[in-house]
Amino acid sequence: MFKNEPATTKGEQTREHIFDCALELFRENGFDAATMQDVATRANVAKSAAYYYFPGKEAIIQAYYEAVQTRQEQLCAEVFAETKDLKKRLYAAMHTKFDLAQDDRKLLGVVFRYTGEPQHPLSCLGSGTAEIRRRSMQVFQQALAVERLPKDLEQLLPLALWSLQMGLLVMFLYDTSAAQKRTRQLASGSLDFTLKMMTLARLPVLKPIRSKILSLLREADLLPE
């Protein structure tokens, strides 16, 4: 679903096969109910082979999130290459994540389950997902690249937009409206509001406030490297 190029080596093909079978199993029975033995049985490989490529179910979910992130980057790169319209670029950065997660909300929910466990590899604010967070913010940074912004806003906005997206993803998980229409409308409305507020936020008179916010975020270690 997410890969553009097929695996080339036998090992890559085996890993991809186990990955695909595991996702099928998680979608059918849920993450908690499935075991690595179930994954191996579905993939028709030895249990040791499944563990060779994935040390556990969490590693499979990590690979899934990375695949989603990679695909989002590809989709957004296509949009960014076609338009310099900031609204279209931000809409792509926000909504492609929803598009890719549309049929996998149960899998997406696993990462939020461990929010209160910083050391868990799937915690959305833990070290295990730090690289995914950085790449997610970078998508917004690239979307904003066509806009001339003060340096502090260049740092603040990607984090703010990523935070908005994470909050909306929680709502996305619980949204029972058709195609999660309520969440998507809120996302679009929030982006429209953000675009209007950007004009105000960049005013020189607000620079001390922006600097203070930036300083607080640095002290809290919330800004990506």
Image (cartoon, rainbow, N blue to C red):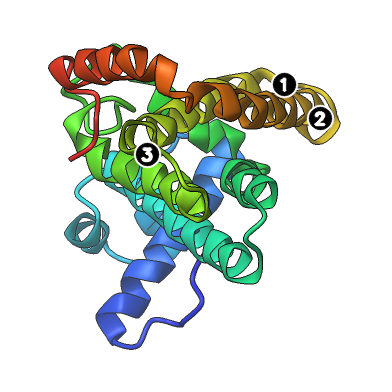
Of the numbered discs 1 and 3, the one sitting upstream in the chain is 3
Instruction: Tell me whether the residue at label 2 lies in contact with that at label 3, contact meaning CB atoms closer than 8 angstroms.
Output: no
Q: Residues within 10 Å of mark 2 (few under 14, many from 20)?
A: few
Left of 38 or right of it: where is 101? right
User: SS of the residue at dot 1?
Assistant: loop
Look at 57% across and 70% down and name the residue there.
81
Q: Amino acid at mark 2?
A: Lys
Q: Amino acid at mark 3?
A: Glu
Q: Which mark is residue 181?
A: 2
Q: Residue 144 at what x, y percent from top left?
A: 49, 47
Instruction: Tell me whether the residue at label 2 lies in contact with that at label 1, contact meaning CB atoms closer than 8 angstroms.
Output: yes
User: SS of the residue at dot 2?
Assistant: helix
Left of 191 or right of it: where is 46? left
**Residue 77 in view here:** yes
How far apart in space, not on screen, are marks 1 and 3 (Cα)? 32 Å
Look at 66% across and 64% down and name the residue there.
83
Look at 72% across and 25% down and name the residue there.
183
Q: Amino acid at mark 1?
A: Asp
Q: Residues within 10 Å of mark 3 (few under 14, many from 20)?
A: some
Q: Which residue is mark 1?
A: 175
Q: Nearer the viewer, mark 1 or mark 3?
A: 3
Q: Which residue is mark 3?
A: 154
User: SS of the residue at dot 3?
Assistant: helix
Front in this rendered view, residue 178 or 156: 156
Front in this rendered view, residue 134 or 8: 134
Q: Which quadrant: the C terminus?
A: top left
Front in this rendered view, residue 77 or 67: 77
Q: Which mark is residue 137?
A: none
Of the numbered discs 2 and 3, the one sitting upstream in the chain is 3
Q: Which quadrant: the N terminus?
A: bottom right
Q: Residue 3 at what x, y percent from top left?
A: 49, 71
> Taking 71 as reference, is 134 above or below it?
above
